[in-house]
Image: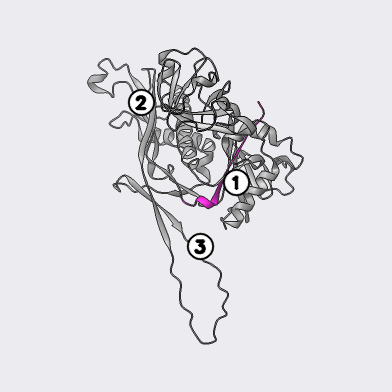
Amino acid sequence: MALNTALTTANGIAPTVKAYYDRRLIEEMKPKLVHYTYAQKRPMPRNGGKAVSFRKWTPFGAITQPLTEGVVPDGQNLSMTEITATVAGYGGYVSVSDLLDITAIDPVVSDAIVLMADQGALSVDNIIRDVLHKGSNVLYVGDKAHRYELSAADKLTSADLRKAARILKKAKAPQIMRGGKGYYVAIVGPDTVYDMQEDATWQDVSKYQDAEQIFSGEIGRLYGVIVVETPEAKKFTAPVVAQGSVSATAAAASAYASATKKLTIVETISQEEAQALVGREIMIPLSAGNVYCDTVTAAQDNVITLKSGYTGTDTDLNGKSVYGGGAGAAGAPVASTLVVGRDAYGVVDIEGSGNARSIVKPAGSGGASDPLDQISTVGWKVDAFAAAILQQGWMVRIEHGFSA
């Protein structure tokens, strides 16, 4: 598609072409912005500083006293808490051919816009996802008490979604409305979907009894919870303790000294690898399903120093494996499913006011930095973005294992 115009702006792109690229960028980004979709969205006013405020309303309780005839009751005051987040800009670009036509919609640029939209959506959605995983409302599958107790066998089931829905209902979390009906939304990853489809109670989109508009990425519905799939769903993985190995072995009983908080790693590791352990959390599986967690504060050769120091018997550590912290039992990866209600979290609107935009620079627009008019670039930019949790009780993070 080409536009018959010779009009150019200071950066060499006709306004109508610029508008096309901006629209294309947003259209390509939207289907991939899964975590963004269900947030409270706030505009970022121009010249408004680096902070954005989200509204957190305090719900009213029940009124159980009857009205008195002829008596005007006392009014109620709206109670709102402002949650403030600091915004930042994000963006990226790629160089393209120096043969870019400044008055036409170039196929190479259009393709580059799609790639930039993919990166922009991935970036924004990951930022939101990581903020949401700082939430404190956590449900561990299999009645486990900690993430490090979860194994691959602790898969997400329909019963877990029912529990999450019950938690949100008891917290009076408002539902996300669609077609006059209210739902909670669960954001899951492909591995979780694979396991859930073995559940006898699973209801996928093709089996819906009533025709209704579905959300992008929606793959099913259970107990009033709409399930939306994204490959960007969070996973917790254990870092490698020693390069080339997922575990290292604790030495004989005499190698651990509680007074000095030192532990010897039997596996041979280099000094560089030992230093890479500093600041990491480690986990050591003990008897009866217990796990010892500590943080490495120093490392010299195969001897690491722990922050707290183990207070049990030395023999409990003897021969055990050492895993990086932050994952499941014996370093098993753990998946996260977020179940959210309306206004559980907020984000800066990237669709309004040109907040998300394409930036196309033809060859020759760079001045002295491009003396031979050779460099053209295509980029994406979000001028100001932030995300924040508004209501901890209106979102539940279910942590669980999954099939390999």
Identify the residue position indicated by label 2 in the image. 102
Q: Is residue 72 above or below residue 55?
A: below
Q: Which secondary structure, mark 3?
A: loop
For the residue marked with disc 3, what is the amino acid? Pro
For the residue marked with disc 1, what is the amino acid? Val
Q: Is residue 139 above or below residue 263?
A: below
Q: Which secondary structure, mark 1?
A: strand
Identify the residue position indicated by label 1 in the image. 185
In front of the other: 126 or 378: 126
Q: Which residues are magenta?
A: 390-404
How packed mark 1 is, by other alpha carbons closer than 10 Å (few <14, some 14-19, many 20 or more), is many
Q: Is residue 95 left or right of residue 114?
A: left
* Residue found at x 60% / y 34%: 290
Of labels 1 and 2, earlier in sequence is 2
Distance from Cα at disc 1 to Cα at disc 2: 44 Å
Among the 4 quarters of the image, the one containing residue 169 = bottom right
